[in-house]
Image (tube, rainbow, N blue to C red):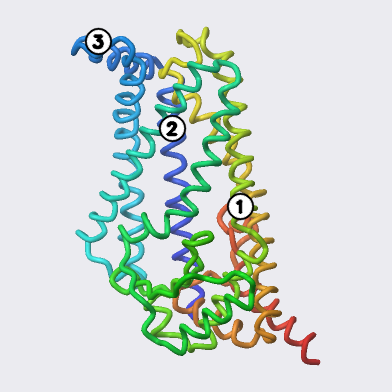
Amino acid sequence: MNQDKSARYHSLRRRAAVVSAAWSLLYLVAFALTPASRWLADLVRGVAEGVGVPASLVSTGEVLAFVVIFGAGHEAGAFLVAFYRGFLLEHRYGLSTERFWSWMADQAKAAVIGTVIALAGFALLYAGIRRWPHEWWAAAGLGFTLFVVVMARLAPVVLLPLFFTFKPLGREELKRRLMHLAARAGVPAVDACEWRLSDRTKKANAALTGLGRTRRVIVSDTLLASHSDDEIEAVLAHELGHHAHHDIWKGIALESAVALAGFFVASRVLLVSAARFGWEGPADVAGLPVLLLTAGVLSLALVPAVNAFSRRMERAADGFAFELLGTSATFTSAMQRLGAQNLAEQRPSLLARWFFYTHPPYEERIRAAQEWEARARP
């Protein structure tokens, strides 16, 4: 694998991510620290009252209109970075097979779904703030946790099919092996499906998605075309490790804790900022940029710790795969193929690992597999 090429690719992706974060930060600061937020809130309230919206619905209508206009302005700038990072860069490095209009269609679908979720979420959030001006953060944290749990269960069968094509895995012997492996791991799946990625990317992947009755094995057609059955089994064994170790629930707990902390800090900031910025109170939607800015800065500060926790779970899932298979040799060969196919970065900097790596670098994973094999078979 051309390490110079992969290093440049990942360096450019990280730069784009930094630009995207900087744009979001500047956009929020511009609204939070200038009269822009107050002006927009007054504008949407005036329009709502002017068109005869019932007084009982003015507050909710104001929140919805503010979120749409405020969010559209942010996404207009964010789209340029997303286009560069998700389309141009992938094509430049020979990883994407997706046509422009297909990519645009996916972006449009994601925007519609994201808008619906955001409108419902912020409407409920501000209803909670109006109901509990001082304790709303606790209700918001609980609501976030419920939402994440529901999405973890339903996303594989409701959302993913909106973007990808799935069909029953046609290789019967491989399907039998994967389903048997899942049963041996104690996390039986309801089905094994082929996941069509080749119309979008040359990268390969496999996953065990869903919870309970929605849990299913999905294997990309790009992985099926480039890896042996043994290697595919090794990739799945890693995914089974996450479910066997209850990593999905650990991740949900961590996300919920971070969100709860963000809501709590934001609630304190909103209370002390209301008088300074001329808001009517924490429930004034003019304070939304400050709420998002506070929660966003806190989340960004916690990224290294969250990523370190994630890398620890990934290492444990690798170890589970070695034990389940009784060998790490096929895992090693699978990682080598995936590294070349996905243009993985071999030796990222320490700073890059802290802020961008939820998985250990693939070279580290291969080394751990080889060390396990040496201990198991001296």
Mark 2 = which residue?
A: 26
- Front one among 193 and 281: 193
**Where's residue 260, x and y in %?**
61, 34
Q: Secondary structure at mark 3?
A: helix
Q: Which mark is residue 224?
A: none
- Answer above or below: position of 334 versus 9: below
* Proximity of marks 1 and 2: CB atoms separated by less than 8 Å: no
Front of the two marks 2 and 3: 3
Residue shown at 57% from the left, 70% from the top:
239
Q: Distance of mark 2 from mark 3, alpha carbons? A: 31 Å
Q: Which residue is mark 3?
A: 49
Per the model, the C-alpha gap separating discs 3 and 1 is 43 Å
The reply, left or right, for residue 80 in relation to residue 351 is left
Please report whichever mark, 3 or 1, sits nearer to the chain's N-terminal start.
3
Q: Secondary structure at mark 1?
A: helix
Q: Residues within 10 Å of mark 1 (few under 14, many from 20)?
A: some
Residue located beneath label 1 in the image: 251
Q: Is residue 5 visible?
A: no
Q: Is residue 285 above or below residue 124?
A: above
Q: Could you tell me the amino acid type at mark 3?
A: Glu
- Looking at the rendered structure, the secondary structure element under dot 2 is helix
Residue 86's place in the image compared with 338, above or below, is above
* Residue toward you, 130 or 42: 130
Which is more foreground, mark 1 or mark 2?
1
